[in-house]
Image (cartoon, helix red, strand yellow):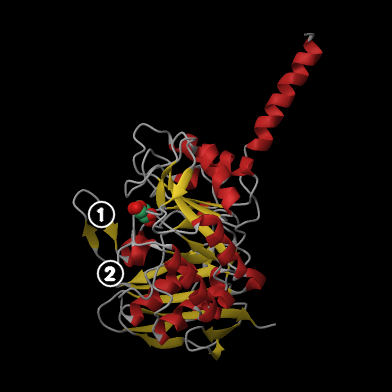
């Protein structure tokens, strides 16, 4: 072989690596929206549940509000066949995954599935370690659109390597599959996963409480406020196509209505994926109103894709800002106290600057119209001091639009 041909060979080899080393682009230009079985149903997943959840997503108005993915979390697996292909538990999924994907697609929705980078999933089912390409191929053949990829039983595995391998396997299988990393923030995925996944968990699991730490004997799960606090310092890493994921929603699972509203509003402010985790077949009017508030969802889905930031905190009354496209802003007053809190916010003297993304409100020069996103009312403009009372564990969420 002469030096020209060997150079060409090396070039083709490197080019091959280059084109293979990609994730599917444009799958998550705004934060993904959907539903996942884990928070409410744990291991109790089956075909009937998933079909009826798909029906309920349409009938409840959630599909129209933008929810798209139905994700089956852990415990769907039956085993591997003699060739190593994974198959679902036939008692839980008697018609198999392809038929289920076809059904979900027939409703205009997409189907997600779960696996794990280790030898076993967190609940002890077969993991994808050593079977990445085979599993990715199988998911593509079934018509899967989303993969949540967990991190249990991964002793001595390098996370960048493991998640890149599955990213490459999915890409090679050829079906666009949104890749959701669930590594709990342990090795700071925000620093390295932008070109690997579309979203990455930033924390351990969420727990249905306002501000508690739940001890499982060796590991903890976290209340809504604890998870919120753990997002500090991460906003610079998120943007269209790659999102910080503070875990799935607990709205409708037992928090008070005020707390559910605050939880949903803050996930919207964080530009977090909105993955509902409740029983969509059996929702109170309040739960539906929260999960389908189009104006709050519009803040989350804004095309700039900028994660909001805490502007200040005064005795547990926090003020958050999120830059939106066209010079608009979302503002959220979050009352973490156990009593109501009175806000007096004099726009003109506040200097709100987003140093990371280069935006400022310039309240002294620009007057904004104010819309209350939960009351769905226009309530004046920023010339006047904003005065209101925020109930305990609740929010007031506003959208500011510059007056021309
Ligand atoms: C981990 C994940 C959860 C869920 C369970 C399933 O705890 O963080 O979101 O997927 O595993 O076993």
Q: Could you classify mark 1 by the number of other residues whose Cα lies within 10 Å: few (under 14), some (14-19), or many (20 or more)?
A: some
Kindly tell me whether residue 57 is visible in this rendering: yes
Q: Residue furthest top?
A: 1
**Residue found 35% across the figure and 65% down from its top:** 41
Q: Earlier in the sequence, mark 2 or mark 1?
A: 2
Left or right side of 231 for 164: right
Kindly tell me whether residue 196 is visible in this rendering: no
Image position, residue 372 (x, y; %): 50, 85
Q: Could you classify mark 2 by the number of other residues whose Cα lies within 10 Å: few (under 14), some (14-19), or many (20 or more)?
A: some
Image position, residue 48 (x, y; %): 44, 68
Q: Nearer the viewer, residue 110 or 261?
A: 110
Vertical side of 315 occupied by 272: above or below? above
Task: Indicate the secondary structure of the residue bearing disc 2.
Answer: loop
Quadrant, the N terminus = top right
Q: Residue furthest left?
A: 217
- The residue that label 2 is drawn on is 209
- The residue that label 1 is drawn on is 220
Q: Quadrant of ligand 1?
A: bottom left
**Residue found 40% across the figure and 78% down from its top:** 261
Image position, residue 113 (x, y; %): 48, 54
Vertical side of 252 occupied by 311: above or below? above
Callout count: 2
Q: Quadrant of residue 359?
A: bottom right
Q: Nearer the viewer, residue 249 or 202?
A: 249
């Amino acid at each position: 072989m002469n030096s020209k041909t060997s150079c060409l060979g090396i070039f083709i080899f490197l080019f091959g690596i280059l084109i293979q080393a990609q994730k599917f682009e444009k799958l998550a230009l705004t934060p993904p929206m959907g539903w996942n079985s884990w928070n409410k149903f744990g291991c109790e997943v089956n075909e009937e549940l998933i079909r009826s959840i798909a029906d309920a997503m349409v009938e409840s108005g959630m599909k129209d509000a933008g929810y798209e993915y139905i994700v089956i979390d852990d415990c769907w697996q039956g085993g591997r066949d003699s060739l190593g292909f994974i198959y679902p538990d036939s008692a839980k999924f008697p018609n198999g995954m392809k038929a289920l994907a076809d059904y979900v697609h027939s409703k205009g929705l997409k189907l997600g599935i779960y696996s794990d980078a280790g030898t076993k999933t967190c609940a002890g089912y077969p993991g994808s370690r050593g079977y990445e390409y085979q599993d990715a191929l199988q998911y593509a053949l079934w018509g899967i659109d989303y993969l949540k990829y967990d991190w249990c039983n991964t002793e001595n595995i390098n996370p960048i390597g493991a998640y890149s391998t599955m990213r490459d396997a999915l890409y090679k299988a050829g079906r666009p599959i949104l890749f959701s990393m669930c590594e709990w923030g342990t090795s700071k995925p925000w620093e390295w996963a932008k070109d690997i996944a579309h979203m990455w968990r930033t924390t351990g699991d969420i727990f249905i409480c306002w501000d508690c730490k739940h001890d499982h004997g060796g590991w903890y799960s976290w209340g809504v406020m604890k998870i919120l606090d753990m997002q500090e310092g991460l906003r610079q890493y998120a943007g269209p196509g790659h999102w910080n994921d503070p875990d799935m929603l607990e709205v409708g699972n037992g928090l008070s209505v005020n707390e559910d509203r605050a939880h949903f509003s803050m996930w919207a402010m964080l530009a977090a994926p909105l993955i509902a985790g409740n029983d969509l077949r059996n929702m109170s009017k309040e739960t539906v109103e929260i999960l389908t508030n189009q104006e709050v969802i519009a803040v989350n889905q804004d095309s700039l894709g900028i994660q909001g930031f805490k502007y200040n905190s005064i005795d547990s009354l926090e003020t958050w800002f999120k830059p939106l496209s066209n010079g608009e802003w979302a503002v959220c007053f979050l009352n973490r106290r156990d009593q109501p809190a009175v806000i007096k916010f004099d726009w003109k003297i506040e200097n709100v600057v987003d140093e990371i993304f280069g935006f400022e409100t310039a309240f002294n020069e620009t007057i904004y119209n104010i819309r209350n996103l939960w009351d769905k009312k226009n309530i004046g403009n920023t010339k006047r001091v904003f005065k209101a009372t925020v109930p305990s564990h609740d929010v007031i969420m506003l959208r500011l639009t510059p007056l021309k």
